[in-house]
Image (cartoon, helix red, strand yellow):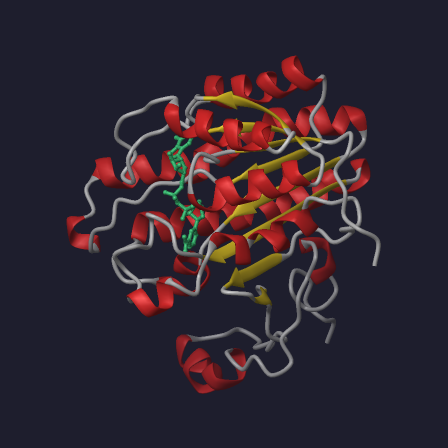
């Protein structure tokens, strides 16, 4: 297996001042990428800002001879996203890799989930991914090459009590990737999604200490590094990575059950057939469902 090397490549990692983002940025830089270390420098719930977090990681990269510049913009605005991408182009003349990783938490059970908690989390995760990915995608399309890694969570892919805002944002990111993989295909832009699990300030009070000790961010980063590489030819994959364990999640569809003039009672009678995932299939595009009885009914 050829060594994965990013010499000549330029990367942005958002939220790279701590936790997983820091680990991704350091490893990309160790392997030769020039890195924009973006971080707003706020608290876990997204309050406050500062330049110390991004600066510290830039210093760490420079200490081993790597190339990095800081950026302190919030990912949550269009202006911020554009400025983050501009930082890469101004400093290093291009952009090959974008890792959208920045994130915050405002956990509350759904009845207590007020508009502020909802909007803040959607703004950083879902809108923040749009704000950074769009200017990056435009640049990558022009150059005919790009690797984008977005960050989802098991809280969305599977579900987690008290994280309605976060789960919704994280599944929105998967929907975005499902479309970008198609729009990027012609331009050699691969868009994959990471569902990490790691010991960071985000998880320090939800994981038991013995589990926390085995979940260094560095055990997740190799999956990100591979998905950022030229070697990675897959796109639209959701990859789970935690404590050195790696797997793929997916959305599948069961075979259609055709019912002529269906009534609610017919649905009840056929519920177990309709919901049986035994022969469920993955579809790369909505176009693939046409002719399978999905969008076009079989002729009688
Ligand atoms: P973290 O809190 O250690 O790091 C997140 C970083 O994002 C912080 O340095 C923070 O300052 C930065 N940030 C927050 N809002 C920002 C904004 N508007 N603009 C720019 N930077 C901003 O958290 P962690 O655990 O490293 O999380 C990284 C990503 O992984 C997040 O998207 C998170 O949702 C996701 N994730 C983490 C899991 C875990 O087990 N740690 C589990 C599932 C998903």
In which quarter of the view is residue 141 placed?
top right
The answer to whether 62 is drawn above or below residue 199 in the figure is above
Tell me, yes or no, if residue 75 can be seen here.
no
Residue 199, x across and y down, in percent: 39, 55
* Residue lying at 57% horizontally and 38% vertically, measured from the top left: 25
Q: Residue furthest top?
A: 90
Tell me, yes or no, if residue 203 can be seen here.
yes
The answer to whether 187 is drawn above or below residue 285 in the figure is above
Residue 194, x across and y down, in percent: 55, 53
Camera-nearest residue between 144 and 23: 23
Left or right: residue 209 versus residue 5 is left
Residue 123, x across and y down, in percent: 38, 34
The answer to whether 148 is drawn above or below residue 73 in the figure is below
The quarter of the image holding the N terminus is bottom right
* Residue lying at 44% horizontally and 75% vertically, measured from the top left: 263
* Residue lying at 74% horizontally and 31% vertically, measured from the top left: 9
The quarter of the image holding the C terminus is bottom right
Count of marks placed on residues: 0
In which quarter of the view is residue 39 placed?
top left
């Amino acid at each position: 297996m050829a060594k994965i090397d990013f010499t000549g490549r330029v990367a942005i990692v958002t939220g790279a001042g701590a936790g997983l983002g820091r680990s991704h940025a350091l490893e990309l830089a160790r392997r030769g990428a020039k890195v924009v270390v973006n971080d707003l420098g706020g608290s876990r719930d997204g309050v406050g800002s500062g330049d110390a977090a991004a600066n510290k990681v830039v210093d760490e990269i420079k200490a081993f001879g790597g190339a990095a510049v800081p950026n302190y913009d919030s990912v949550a605005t269009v202006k911020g996203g554009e400025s983050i991408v501009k930082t890469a182009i101004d400093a290093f003349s291009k952009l090959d890799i974008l890792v959208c990783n920045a994130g915050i938490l405002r956990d509350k059970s759904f009845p207590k989930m007020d508009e502020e908690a909802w909007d803040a989390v959607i703004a950083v995760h879902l809108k923040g991914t749009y704000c950074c990915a769009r200017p990056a995608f435009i640049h990558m399309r022009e150059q005919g090459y790009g690797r984008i890694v977005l960050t989802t969570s098991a809280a969305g892919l599977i579900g987690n009590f008290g994280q309605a805002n976060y789960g919704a944002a994280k599944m929105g990111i998967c929907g975005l990737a499902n479309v970008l993989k198609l729009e990027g295909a012609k331009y050699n832009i691969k868009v994959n999604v990471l569902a990490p699990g790691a010991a960071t300030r985000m998880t320090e009070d939800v994981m038991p200490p013995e589990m926390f000790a085995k979940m260094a961010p560095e055990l997740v980063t190799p999956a990100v590094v591979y998905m950022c590489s030229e070697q990675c030819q897959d796109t639209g994959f959701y990859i789970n990575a935690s404590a050195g364990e790696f797997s793929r999640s997916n959305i599948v569809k069961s075979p259609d059950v055709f019912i002529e003039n269906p009534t609610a009672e017919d649905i009840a009678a056929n519920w177990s057939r309709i919901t049986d995932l035994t022969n469920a299939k993955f579809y790369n595009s909505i176009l693939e469902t046409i002719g399978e009885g999905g969008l076009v009914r079989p002729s009688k």
